[in-house]
Amino acid sequence: MLIKKPFAVKPSEITDRSVYMNRRKFMQTTSGFFLAGISSLVTAKTSEQQQGAGLAKLDYQATAAYSTDEEKTPYQHVTQYNNFYEFGTDKYSPAHEAQSLTTRPWSVTVEGEVAKPGTYTLEDILKPHALEERIYRLRCVERWSMVIPWIGFPLADLIKRFEPTSRAKYVEFTTLHRPEEMPGQKRRVLDWPYVEGLRMDEAMHPLTIMAVGLYGEVLPNQNGAPMRLVVPWKYGFKSIKSIVKIRFTEQQPVSAWTRTAPHEYGFYANVNPGVDHPRWSQARERRLGEFLKRKTLLFNGYADEVASLYTGMDLSKNY
Ligand code: MTE
């Protein structure tokens, strides 16, 4: 996200590694005769890639109303190409470094403008909620995207249980801070712990979910176990992982990214092809597993559902 200057970014970081490696292999073995062959080569999938890794299975219902019918990104990309700075700043470290994270017991502290503050165990949190599968796009600010079958429940249903007061205008989320299990936190690449926030109406929007699984199984640690946010119309960094605190506030929260680089990462972070990141264009993106780039859609393709939340706002200023 931050830190690296453009010249320090390797092509293998912008292009998914398997795409990059396949492409090199292709170039080496065929001298590149058929361009069309590239895309079929890189999108070829085995049936195992479409399944989970044998983690605990979840009971859930598929919710077609909110899901895209686009092709799902293979499990191996979803779980091996991650941003989780608590486990390193490159995309491949979280898949192995996060295996040391203990996710049980787990509890979440609820504070601020609510009638029912307290510390809730993960079991308390999950018990009343029926799980749904939502197939959503996730678009990273770094120009890659995926289509992921998340398992979770509407964040609104959880928020209502805590009974926010009329002064609650925003919700702030905080990730676990445990440097002994999260080696990235020993380096000050961010002002730990990772914090993110939403306006109350964004948090209550039916598209916003608390995810506890993907591909039918519990979340792998590297994807934010045991519980993470998914806000599909915002850049991926808003979808905070491994949440331990939810705080309701009257003031707009300051996220970890905004605190570190306010000119690059604003509070809203709505996916917007018309507003460039200061160091790169956001007009296009690479879907992991594909070779050719595609156009980025306003609000990541969810404009019909969410554009009305921002009526009258200048989205180039409120980025
Ligand atoms: N949450 C925490 N706690 N730490 C992080 O570094 N990275 C964010 C977001 N949530 C991040 C985080 C970014 S930049 C992205 S793109 C998504 O997680 C990536 O989610 P994924 O690894 O499940 O694809």
Image: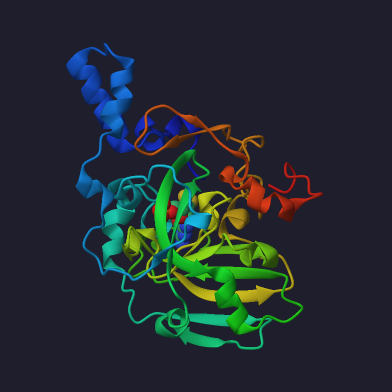
Asked which quadrant contains residue 171, the reply is: bottom right
Query: Residue 65: x, y in percent?
Result: 52, 56
**Rendered-image quarter of ligand 1:** bottom left
Q: Residue at x 56, y 81 (%)?
A: 110
Image-based side of 273 in relation to 50, left or right: right
- Tell me if residue 311 can be seen: yes
Query: Residue 105: x, y in percent?
Result: 35, 82
Residue 116 or residue 45, whichever sits in front: 45
Q: Is residue 32 above or below residue 159?
A: above
Asked which quadrant contains residue 173, the reply is: bottom right
Considering every residue shown, the one lying at the far right of the view is 312
Considering every residue shown, the one lying at the far front of the view is 64
Image-based side of 209 in relation to 54, left or right: right
Query: Residue 316: x, y in percent?
Result: 73, 41
Q: Is residue 167 above or below residue 146?
A: below
Q: Residue at x 52, y 53 (%)?
A: 237
Residue 56 or residue 80, whichever sits in front: 56
Q: Residue at x 63, y 48 (%)?
A: 270
Residue 36 or residue 272, whichever sits in front: 36
Query: Residue 261: x, y in percent?
Result: 61, 49
Image-based side of 292 in relation to 251, left or right: left
Q: Is residue 121 above or below residue 70?
A: below
Image-based side of 141 in relation to 83, left or right: right
